[in-house]
Structures are given as C-alpha cells and as structure tokens.
Image (cartoon, rainbow, N blue to C red):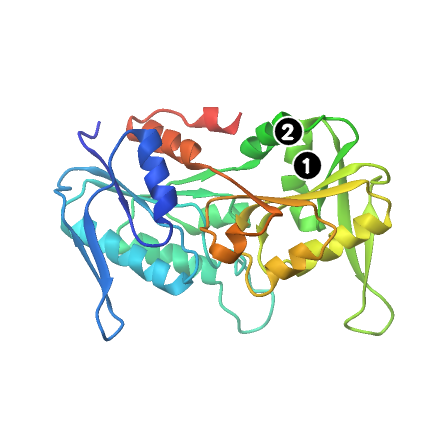
Amino acid sequence: MFSKLKLITGHANRPLAEEVARHAGIPLGDIDLFKFSNDESFVKINDNVRGADVYVIQPTCYPVNDSLMDLLIIIDALKRASAQRINCVIPYYAYARSDKKDQPRVPITAKLVADLITTAGADRVITVDLHADQIQGFFNIPVDHLYATPSFARYFKSIMQMEDIVVVSPDSGGANRARALAKRLSCSLAIGDKRRSGNDDNAELLNIIGDVAGKTCILFDDIIDTGGSLVKVAKALEEHGAKKILAACTHGILSGKAVQLLESSPIEKLFITNTIPLDEEKQNCSKIVQLSIAEMLAMAIKKIHIEESISILFR
C-alpha cells in the first residue's frame, strides 16, 4: 500500500486536473513548469514526493509536442525525486492514429510515444478512448483503458426519449465503438460506407448501411479533428431522411475550420468530453456541448491507488 497519493499536472489541461483534484479531495501538487528563452522546458517539483504514488494528469493535446515533452520531463523529475510509483493520466493520447505501417517508409509513432513514456520512467498509464485498442500492447507497463461511452449513454438517457434513436458509426472502423453505445441505449446501429465513384480519385459515394429515415441519429466517434468526414456523413444522413442529427465524440480536437464546418452542417449538437480544453471560439459555439470525465478519472485514480478493481467504471 502506498502511503501518499499525489496529483500533479502540466499546462496541457489544468481545468480538467483541477476538477479531478476536487472530486478526489486531493490538492494539486506544486510544481514550476516554464520555458527558457531558448525554448527549452524546465520542471521543478516543489512538493516532497519521496515514496509517493504520483498521478501526472497531462493529455498530449495542442501544442502536442510541447505537451508530450512536458510530460516526459515531469516523469524524469519525479523519478529523480524518488517517487515510488509514477502514473501517467493521459486522457487524450496523441499520435494514436499512427498505429500501423499503412504506407512504405512511415513510422509507427504511437509505439514511439509509448516507448518514450516508458523509458522516461512511467510505471502505469491511464487513458481514455484510444483510437485503437491494440495501442495498449505498445506499452510494457500496465495500461488502464477507460471509456467515455457509459458517460455519453447516461447523458443521452437523461435528455431525450429513447424512441426512434439510431447510433451511427461514420465508418466501418468505428463500428464496435458505436455498437457499444447502441447496446447501452437499446437502439439500432447504422454505418457510413465510403466508396470511390468511377475513376475520379476525389469522388466519394457515401452509403448508409442501416435504416435512418425518420429517426434521430447520433453520430458517434472517438475523435473529431477537422470535422470533414463527420459533416459528410451528417449530410448523407440528411439525404437518407434522418429526422434529427446529433454527434458525440470523446476527443474534440476541432482543428482548422472545424467550428465553421460544424456551424453550417445539419448536426444540431456536438457532444464532446473535456479531455481536450476548448479555446474561446469553440466555447462560444452554440452547437458544442462539453461533458466532464473528471469524476471518472478521480474514481479511477483512487481505486488504483488502493489496488481495487476499476470495473465499476465500465458499467
């Protein structure tokens, strides 16, 4: 049993870390984290962490490389300060889409990041909705993979009638994820199917596999980045007679013109979690609703600290 539980965070998503600390009833540790004028990062842990069970809350979101480097330096500082166990709470795991060699001479960056975190000295990783489940196997340390699906299911049940609902996966790759939500909502499933049309490399014919006519559709995915694919599927659902179109994604990156695309799309609301902080433009978008996973993370941290099962978080 570990005598001391410590929470520490970098700059990546301090509001989430503060909310986790409130739910856990444990104050955030005091650290100095800044950049020198030559752009090198510096970390100093001001609290005594010798023999402590430390949880570093640091998603690797924008700016991705700075967030990742800060995480690695914090891990190293904790290791050299004699922390007994270093747990990395990474709600959003960057580079997760680079999980395989799908072209000649390309890296598997998700594996590289796993190696960096492990080599730096992490003893455990806690993350949420990895883009591919097999990324857990890139680590040679324990990985606790949490899911936002139960939180989304509870929220949807609280705000809408569960009649004429269909959960839609934007593509076949996310079908298992969408099926899990559909099962919790006791509703049907549909899948977007992209196909090339003729000899035009840029032309895509988007079919919808499943009955969506006259129904409320919930587009469900793990990440929304530029929003292009999600909006295309939403337009196809509209053409197939969907009555109402909602979307839900765990990680709202919303890069480039994603907010403008969302505003002009048939999607009425986009529900995302707070794994990634929202800037002012996204906060002011009337279509974006942010749900918190802080309580889930706090519960996971406390249960892992006392060596209890976290299976209750999957219900």
Instruction: State which quadrant residue 297 falls in.
Output: top left
- Residue 247 is labelled as none
Left of 151 or right of it: where is 265?
right
Looking at the picture, which amino acid does disc 1 mark? Arg
User: Residue 145: horizontal and vertical position, in percent?
Assistant: 46, 39
- From this viewpoint, is residue 169 visible? yes
- Which quadrant would the N terminus be assigned to in this image? top left
Mark 2, residues whose alpha carbon is within 10 Å: few (<14), some, or many (≥20)? few
Q: Is residue 17 left or right of residue 75?
A: right
Q: Is residue 95 above or below residue 312?
A: below
Count all numbered tags in the image, as a single digit. 2
Q: Nearer the viewer, residue 235 or 196?
A: 235
What is the secondary structure assignment of the residue under circle 1?
helix
Going from N to C along the chain, the mark reached first, 1 or 2, is 2
**Residue 169 location in percent, x, y?**
70, 45
What residue is shown at x 57% (from left), y 58% (from top)? 225
Is residue 125 visible in the rendered image? The answer is no
> In terms of secondary structure, where does tag 2 sit?
helix
Q: Is residue 262 left or right of residue 134?
A: right
Q: Which residue type does callout 2 highlight?
A: Ile
* Residue ID for mark 2: 159
Residue drawn at (58%, 34%), measured in percent from left and top?
A: 152
Q: Are marks 1 and 2 in contact (CB under 8 Å)?
A: no
Per the image, the residue denoted by label 1 is: 179
User: Residue at point 36% right, 37% down?
Assistant: 19
